Amino acid sequence: MHHLHTPLLLRVTTLVAVTLLSLAPGCDSGSDPMVESDASSASLCQRYGGAANVGGVVADYVVPELLGDCRVQSRFAALGEAGQTHLVQCLQIQVQEVFGCDGVQYAGATDANGGACRSMTAAHAGLGISDGDFDAVIEDIVAGMQAAGVAQADIDAVAPTVLGLRDPIVEVSSDALTEATCTP
């Protein structure tokens, strides 16, 4: 079993301040990306404007962080355009479920072309993903959410679910990055 690294927990707690939801496609560019309601009983999804806004955060903020990070970008670039589209759509569904969007369930979901969204174990099997790779992706997710204006308390609320994906994803117990393309 993999354990959360204390420095990662501190980074996630620190970073998980303002991150996972923003403008839905087609919204007025002058509008506030994070429109939160005062209803404390509202789901995170409702507080951030619904499933479309939550999906927009993934596509417009989280994915660009992943694709722009030399520590992990080669894994995503290797998917090609169709694979990246599938990944984005399945990740949107997964985050929408985590944010409590009504009627959204990742298990059994498909992308717009009918491609199945696989379990984390199936999707990452044989990729040799390390703890270091996983930590880098978590940092990118948090950075994307923060850039989108997700409140720290809300990032903190979903962090246990996201960090709980370590065991199904990580195959190499090492802080080393397995496919980083960064140059010193």
Image (cartoon, rainbow, N blue to C red):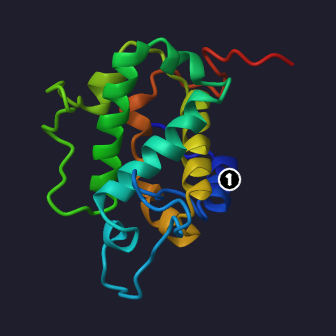
Label 1 amino acid?
A: Arg
x 50%, y 68%: residue: 34
Q: Is residue 3 visible?
A: no
Q: Secondary structure at mark 1?
A: helix
Question: Which quarter of the figure has residue 147?
Answer: bottom right
Q: Is residue 181 above or below residue 97?
A: above
Q: Where is residue 151 drawn, in percent x and y? A: 55, 69
Quadrant, the N terminus: top left
Tell whether 14 sits left or right of 133.
right
22 lies left or right of 139 = left
Residue 84 in the image, given as x and y percentages of width and height: 40, 23
Sort mark 1 into few (<14), some (14-19) or many (20+) by Cα contacts within 10 Å: some
Q: The C terminus appears in which quarter of the rendering?
A: top right
Label 1, on which residue? Answer: 11
User: Residue 30 at x, y = what percent?
Assistant: 56, 65
Residue at 45%, 66% in the rendered image:
157
Q: Is residue 50 left or right of residue 131?
A: left
Front residue of this view, candidates 148 and 12:
148
Q: Quadrant of residue 12?
A: bottom right
Residue at 34% over, 44% down: 92
* Residue 26 visible to the viewer: yes
